[in-house]
Image (tube, rainbow, N blue to C red):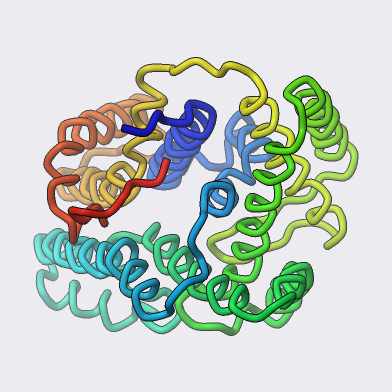
Amino acid sequence: MKTRNNAFDLLCGLCILRMVTLHAICQTQLRGTPWWKETMAWTFFFMSLFFFKAGYFNKGITGETLPYLRDRVRRLFVPYLSWGVIGFVLAFFWLCLFPEGIAKAIGKVQTFTWLESGLTFGNGPLWFLLSFFATYVLMHFIERVRYLHWVVLLFPAIGYWLFKQGNPLWFFMNNVFCGTFFFYIGKVWHHVLDKTPKPWALLVSALLFVGFVFANIYLHGEYEMKTNHWVGPFWQVLLIMPLSLLGISGILLSLPTPRVPVINYIGEHSMVFFVMHYPIVLSYAYASILLGHPFRKSIPDLIIILVITFVLCFLAVPYVERVPWLSGRWKGESKEK
């Protein structure tokens, strides 16, 4: 049995904690509070970490096309469709309980931008699985052509241009270009760390992290992956993103990073927490509205949402992971670290 990579499990666990908290905060309308705005200003790069991690560990984006696509469809696209249907049914159920009943539910569905958002009605974070799938497919075809991978260096500029054009691509596909760029950086970073002695890797990573801190203070720029939204000048964002991913991951990978029980467990089973959390958060919001409970701008409700969400996800992990079309874990296939 392969040993887990504690560094990336820790980072992924922290990313899930931050993501779930963000969605709970959005439902309770606390996103504008100073403490959360400051948190976002220092953690905006976390969703990009999953693309970076995928590139870091990936060993098979070439090979035969049909088996490769079949594997990606099973691992990513099937869970995307499955949880998309579950999210839709659950949200439709809650909407039918409102005074206007099924008419309100149908009206909500009719006004949903399906082409823009994809199958995310009731489970908005699913955009990530589709973008992840598209990134894997794109990298596969790029790597099949000798030296074409250098074109990936132009992808952030394409992503920024799409942002300036109003992000015209369907299904949140505008972010795939930056996702592919982060994927490729992770792939290169793994090669660099393998060839570099640990002390030197730690020193370089520490310098990169210090560079990220100073750049984020004095040249602050943010990239919101879901909407391919750039905040600040292009070159500032392009500087900060690699510095953050390389510096933080490099330090943890160069040190004997211990396993932090709860956080690393979340990172190990991040798929379950990712696909399940939003319907739970949304259900709490719908139930509160139906019961006339004022949960807006309520810190106690935020805490309750987080406790309920994480408890249910922890309990569901062993059951969801046994169902391939929900977890993307199919028998006979190796698990990524």
In the rendered structure, the answer to whether residue 131 lies left or right of residue 272 reads right
Residue 326 falls in image quadrant: bottom left
Q: In percent of the image, x 16 and y 32: which residue is there?
A: 315
> Residue 194 placed where, x, y %?
68, 37
In the rendered structure, the answer to whether residue 56 lies left or right of residue 262 reads right
> Residue 134 placed where, x, y %?
48, 72
Name the quadrant of the N terminus: top left
The residue most toward the right is 218
Residue 228 falls in image quadrant: bottom right
Q: In percent of the image, x 62 and y 25: which residue is there?
A: 252
Q: In percent of the image, x 85 and y 53: which residue is there?
A: 236
Q: Is residue 187 above or below residue 217?
A: below
Q: Is residue 223 above or below residue 10?
A: below
Q: In percent of the image, x 37 and y 33: which residue is there?
A: 2
Figure disc tally = 0
> Residue 39 placed where, x, y %?
62, 33
> Residue 34 placed where, x, y %?
64, 32
- In the image, 195 versus 107, the foreground residue is 195
Q: Is residue 316 above or below residue 251?
A: below
Name the quadrant of the C terminus: top left
- In the image, 189 versus 23, the foreground residue is 189
